[in-house]
Image (spheres, grey):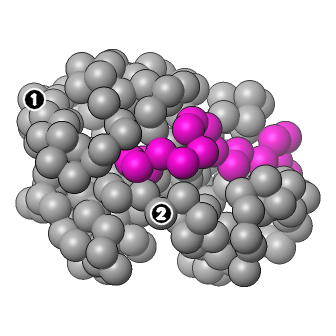
Amino acid sequence: MYSDGETLENDCMGCMKCELGKTRTNLVFGVGKKDAEVLFIGEGPGENEDLQGEPFVGRGGKLLDKYLQAIDLDRKKNIYIANMVKCRPPKNRDPKPEEQDECIFWLREQVRIMRPKIIVCLGRISAQRIISPDFKVTKQHGEFFEKNSTLMMGTFHPAALLRNPNQKPAALEDFMALKEKIIEVCERTY
Ligand code: URA
């Protein structure tokens, strides 16, 4: 267990606990306000993220930034964005269960130190790991669940929205609901 985020990040940056460490260009620890009240969790770095060392910097990331902007959130100012796994799986395959099992330690420590009031899971992989194993994004997106006194919500992954633009209005509604929840429970975000 870590007592400060800086040591945690430093140790994580050198992680070689699974195979993904051998093929990464950069480990993607996360981006944003270190003591944010709202934490977004994606699946894992893709090619652009691996090259730049920052989550959601490709096409999906640009779309995510638009949704964030729509509710006055900004990765540089008032939220934090991290991923389930910190290193890019080769050819963007799904992270293997054993890779997720090793890597979740770092995310758990990030959450323990940050103590966010709200966690937003981007897509099925993170929602099923963090909210509930049978989470169905199409059915349960936008619903808030309370777990360990933290509110959690799952919504569409930005890459899924690029593939299925018909889901964009529903995603925007989820972000609107998120804004209301932030106003209700957060003190320092807006
Ligand atoms: N998809 C994710 O889930 N995370 C990223 O950082 C980029 C793409």
Check disc 1 and report the residue beneath it: 169
Up-down: is 30 above or below 131? Answer: above
Q: CA distance from mark 2 to mark 1?
A: 30 Å
Give the quadrant of the C terminus: top left
Q: Is residue 83 magenta?
A: no
Q: Amino acid at mark 2?
A: Arg
- x%, y% of residue 20? 78, 60
Q: Which tag is nearer the camera, tag 2 or tag 1?
A: 2
In this picture, residue 141 sits left or right of residue 105? left
Check disc 2 and report the residue beneath it: 115
Please state which of residues 25 and 188 is positioned toward the viewer in this rendering: 188
- x%, y% of residue 19? 81, 67
- x%, y% of residue 116? 42, 58
Kindly state the secondary structure of the residue where label 1 is placed: helix
Please state which of residues 35 and 141 is positioned toward the viewer in this rendering: 35
Q: Give the residue drawn at x 35%, y 27%.
A: 73
